[in-house]
Amino acid sequence: MTTTRPRNVWVEIALAVILVVTLIPVAWTLVLAFLPNRAIVSPDWQLDFWIGNFTTLFDDNAFITQVANSVQIVAGAVLLCIGIGAVTGYALSRLHPPRWITIPSLVIAGFIPLIPPMTLIPGLYVLLSQLGLLGSITGLILVNAFLNLPFAALMLSSYFSGVPEELREAGLMDGATELRTFVSIMLPVVRPGLAATAIFVGILAWNEFMMGLTLTTGGSTSPVTVGIAELLQPYAVTWGELAAAGTIAAIPLILMAAVANRHIVAGLTAGAVKN
Amino acid sequence: MSTTTAAPARDRVGTSAPRRRRPQTNRSLFRLLALVPFLLFGLVFAVYPLLQVARMAGSDVQIRSGRFEWEWTGLTNLRDVLADAASIQALTNTVVFVAATVIGTLVVGFVLALLVDRAVTLLPLARNVLIWPAVIAPVVVSLMWLLILSPTAGGLNKLLRTIGLSEQGWLGDGPTAMAAVMVVDIWHWTPVVFLFLYTALKGIDASVLEAARVDGAREFQVVRHIVIPSMSAAIGAVILVRIIMGVKAFDEMYLMTRGGPDGATTLVSQHIKTLFFDNLDLGEAAAFSLFTVAVTALVLALVLLVRKAVQR
């Protein structure tokens, strides 16, 4: 960074090759999304532009419902993770609660990200069926929130740790309660952290597949990732529709990555280190 | 930033008690309650399900008209599931998959970090585009690669045909299916490794590198003797994170191969799913889950111990 090294042509060429390899699957999907099935399965290259894949997809009520389901799941999971995660993160970083409550919290927060979620599914299946939430959006919101809560809490706790202690003391000295100091001083200060965490939890909840697959009955009860998987019938795959659905599921995230690049990078690295 | 005004002074004027007292008492209540929602979530969604998994692992469970019927059988399930060749295959597949993809993403990610660090023209583009794979849903990633690898509609076979080479049934043969799934995993998660290592690389004191170069060290020597040693902590963290991600892998295999052909790409998660939902061997699925959790915990504990020993 400090030195301006001369441009190395080989570095640029090697990087260009990697960038092309990174982009090919994305670009190829985008191309196929605009091709009729006949052109896709034909043995030679036929490139005739067609938007029928998108129209048939949107004529299908199930797909629209699945997108709406995913939006609800993302919104619910983000709200829960930000709400509970902020309080938890603040407590862990600043409040020094008694050990008998801190240690179990840290054990849970450290343990959940380590184990494969599939190992919990038999138990979650029993739990949700007992609560009558099997196959419901509420159930998926709660499960998604639970999966991302440890990450949200730890990420937010590191943001709270970055706030000077004097700020909090000033609030307390002025007579505000601890709760009020948290709500009116600390929360506004860590707003960028809240945004980063929200973006990150949102991406993970939107991308989640395993719980959606195993805890719903599919069709209009499932999130969009499961919907895409259902388009992959063993026989007669409608490749064009599949590509269109994949495009619709990927575009919002790529746009978000372009806009909030720094936040996402912060989340990827911060979250992963804490894991 | 003037933030002191943000919190209005609420204490009544005239109370003779020292100001400190009030926040202290209020604090204790919020302090006590702040972690309760999180703990509640953990108890309901982690501890209780794990207890149910343990109970299920030791029982013969049937679902009759939507209700669970439990009958305690002890260790039978665990014995049965571990005696099953499919379980052993799932375990060995997972070890092979994790080892290959951890090494793969580490090597590619490291090279990428070095390249981006030295790039000038492509630097802005690279910093934006390189994280794309990591934000795309695993389901969509699998779909994208199916559109390339599928024997009927895949672009790769079309390309091979055009240039006169023979087509391959990429996902149809055990070895190529496993290799394909690994390539997809490496494509998908290299960005994460790259970001870690790139951040660590940026943290190295530039003057040290400059000094080495002035002293006539070749680029390879600089990397070998300065860059890699000073990044060892980051590399260790990346390996740990990637091992955890590898053991969790499910979506890609489920969509691309359903664990096949003949279980060649069945990893632990896929195996649990098959046992539980397809074979309805609930007890065996739970026993295998418990076994997976125990082994994962053991391996991670060992890795952490080794890391501690190395750092000392």
Image (cartoon, coloured by chain):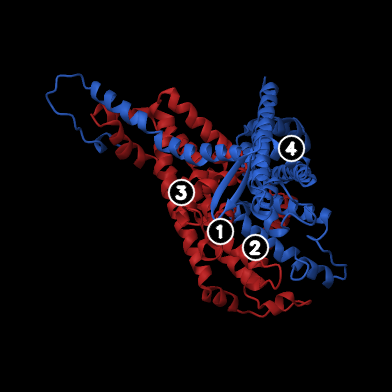
Q: Tell me the mark number nearer the camera, choosing from 1 and 3.
A: 3
What residue did someone put label 2 on?
A: A26
What residue did someone put label 4 on?
A: B79
Q: CA distance from mark 1 to mark 4?
A: 47 Å
Is A49 left or right of A132, judged from the image as shown?
A: right
Q: Amino acid at mark 2?
A: Val
What residue did someone put label 3 on?
A: A131
Discs 2, 3: same chain: yes
Task: Look at 75% across and 68% down and name the residue there.
Answer: B155
In terms of depth relative to the viewer, which is nearer, B83 or B253? B83
In terms of depth relative to the viewer, which is nearer, A130 or B34? A130
Q: Which is nearer the N-term, disc 2 or disc 3?
A: 2
Q: Tell me the mark number nearer the camera, choosing from 2 and 4.
A: 4
Tell me if label 1 and label 3 are in contact, CB under 8 Å: no
Tell me if label 2 and label 4 are in contact, CB under 8 Å: no
Tell me if label 3 and label 4 are in contact, CB under 8 Å: no
Q: Amino acid at mark 1?
A: Ile
Q: Is residue A232 above or below residue A138?
A: below
What residue did someone put label 1 on?
A: A254
Q: CA distance from mark 2 to mark 3?
A: 41 Å
Tell me if label 2 and label 3 are in contact, CB under 8 Å: no
Q: CA distance from mark 2 to mark 4?
A: 45 Å
Image position, residue B232 (x, y; %): 68, 31
Discs 1, 4: same chain: no
In terms of secondary structure, where does tag 4 sit?
A: helix
Q: Amino acid at mark 4?
A: Arg
In terms of secondary structure, where does tag 2 sit?
A: helix
Pointer 2 local density, CA inside 10 Å: few below 14, some 14–19, many at least 20 = many
Identify the subunit bearing mark 2. A
Drawing shade for chain B: blue
